[in-house]
Image: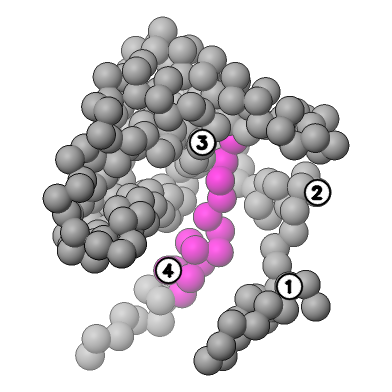
Amino acid sequence: MNRFHDAEIAAVYKVIAERRDMRHFLPDPLDADFLARILQAAHMAPSVGFMQPWRFIRITDAALRVQLHALVEQERINTAHALGEREDAFMRLKVEGIRDCGEVLVVSLMGQRTPHIFGRRTLPEMDLCSVACAIQNMWLAARAEGIGMGWVSLFDPLALSNLLGIPADAKPIAILCLGHVAEFYPRPMLEMEGWANRQNLHNLISENVWEDKTNA
């Protein structure tokens, strides 16, 4: 039988439902074995053409973490300005936990991706999708182990590349904050803060042809 046991299946759906993009962390350090496990989970992700385009940089230097936070803070301000009338509401949100969490990882697309055309000739962004799958694996594994994780995307990729020595043909896509948490949010934080609500799944599904139900 290929089917998992009922309890195992229920656990998979539970961790999917209870995964949260965390912003509030405790400063306690993370176990080295845990870090190895979630990185292995990332490395087990599917990837287009089996190119495995994910690259990870562990940030252990305290001064470098401060510089990362400064990059994110600058982009937070820039994003707030771009939001116009929602600027003040955005500035009240906590959008990262870089200074608070136990571990910081930077995730980047690999360099020299152009020769990889299997599955990417017409959809070159599939390498980005592959790295996103790796990050989701980490998120689910971390949640199952009771560890919080937050994906921070508020940064200038070129500035971050310069700071970390990432090659020009590679591209950073995530700053990941990992750490112990006092509790997990009962619902997504942005929903709790009134920023947005989860859409009705029915409105996002059509059959045979495109049908936009969201504006109906």
**Residue 170: x percent and y percent?**
27, 35
Sequence-wise first label, 1 or 2:
2
Q: Residues within 10 Å of mark 1 (few under 14, many from 20)?
A: few
User: On the image, numbered disc 2 is attached to which residue?
Assistant: 194
Q: Secondary structure at mark 2?
A: loop
Q: Secondary structure at mark 3?
A: strand
Residue farthest front in this picture: 122
1 or 4: tag closer to the N-terminus = 4
Image marks 1 and 2: residues in contact by CB distance under 8 Å: no
- To which residue does mark 4 refer? 12
- Residue 16: percent from the left, percent from the top? 49, 63
Specify the amino acid type for callout 3. Answer: Val
Give the alpha-carbon distance from disc 2 to disc 4, as whole Å.
28 Å
Find residue 171 and report its image quarter.
Answer: top left
Residue 46 visible at all: no
Q: Which mark is residue 4?
A: none
The amino acid type found where label 4 is placed reads Val
Residue 214 is labelled as: 1
Q: Is residue 156 above or below residue 195?
A: above
Residue that badge 3 annotates? 152
Q: Earlier in the sequence, mark 3 or mark 1?
A: 3
Find residue 183 and report its horizontal and vertical position in percent: 61, 42
Q: Residue at image x 85%, y 37%?
A: 85
Residue type at the position of mark 2: Gly
Where residue 172 sits: x, y (%)? 36, 34
Q: Earlier in the sequence, mark 2 or mark 4?
A: 4
